[in-house]
Amino acid sequence: MKKVVIKIGGSVMEDLDASFFTECASLVNHGWWPIIVHGGGPSINRIQESLGQAPVFAKGLRVTDDACLETVEMVLGGSVNKTLVSRLQQAGAKAVGISGVDGPLLEVSQKDPELGWVGEVEDVHTQLLETLLAGGWLPVVASLGTDGCGHRFNVNADTAAGAIAGALHAERLMLVTDVPGVLDRQGSLLSEVTPGRIATMVKDKEIYGGMIPKVKAALTGLDYVQEVVITDGRQDYPFSRIEKGIPGGTRIVKEEKEDGLISNLSKK
Ligand SMILES: Nc1ncnc2c1ncn2[C@@H]1O[C@H](COP(=O)(O)OP(=O)(O)O)[C@@H](O)[C@H]1O
Ligand SMILES: CC(=O)N[C@@H](CCC(=O)OP(=O)(O)O)C(=O)O
């Protein structure tokens, strides 16, 4: 069985219709083991605001003090995780919700004291995921981590998904979001981007905000994952479109592949 890590962004979560979850659930019948990793930034903002906590971000990451960590755990590990698990169960999957703290799956260290309880992934222990997959379960992972000394951390969900996909040597990492993929300044979809193009686009601020951790996660995964795709979860059937080779989303490809394989092929 091939492994596909599917990261569901908070931006698009509430707009995904039942067919998205039916497709996730049916991947097992087509030789794929799906592993869902999810964020939930907008839901955390909403609950923080309702509790009188102002969401604060630095370098694109949520500044996470004690009170904020409690909210993040409650939202990501609680309502968001359970909503996704039950939607997948309704679609026929044997979904089970965990967080990176369980196992522990995600071993982290503090990224930067100024960010508080924000974790940087140090290690991914895949045993729990492998056990669940072998038992026919569909794991749904909330992006939390632990340092193994009793401290729990908030982890960016794109980063968590990239690290998990890399550690599992997954065939595919799909970052599902609210845009068709990486767009250029004119708003046109780029069907492929290389690390070099990404670096230029970030420098020129053509890639900004929430797309930055996504492309970084894609680049992290690229050494171990065969294919990384950023795609819109609201399009019809994002998985089967890609499976059938129908262009959908943006593929992140290594420079060598583009310079070597693709140009060689185009010469034939
Ligand atoms: N070059 C780009 N192409 C597409 N989207 C981009 C680009 N640069 C920045 N973005 C922004 O990134 C957003 C997706 O990131 P984010 O809101 O964090 O989503 P998610 O919750 O799915 O992780 C898009 O909605 C868009 O506003
Ligand atoms: C450290 C950090 O910023 N963590 C993120 C975790 C959730 C996330 O990444 O959600 P999206 O996928 O919806 O962006 C946060 O607190 O918003």
Image (cartoon, rainbow, N blue to C red):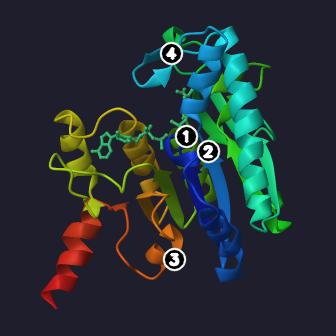
Q: Earlier in the sequence, mark 3 or mark 1?
A: 1
- Cα separation, mark 3 vs mark 2, equals 21 Å
Residue 139, located in which quarter of the rendered image?
A: bottom right
The residue depicted at 15 percent of the width and 49 percent of the height is: 186
Name the kind of residue labelled 1 in the image: Gly
Q: Earlier in the sequence, mark 2 or mark 4?
A: 2
Residue position for label 1: 10
Residue 250, located in which quarter of the rendered image?
A: bottom left
- Label 4 CB-ligand 2 distance < 8 A: no
**For the residue carrying disc 4, how many other residues have a C-alpha within 10 Å: few (<14), some (14-19), or many (20+)?**
few
Name the kind of residue labelled 3 in the image: Ser
Question: Residue 75 in the image: x percent, y percent?
Answer: 70, 30
Q: Quadrant of ligand 1?
A: top left
Question: Residue 239 in the image: x percent, y percent?
Answer: 52, 71
Q: Which mark is residue 112?
A: 4
**Quadrant of the snapshot with the N terminus:** bottom right
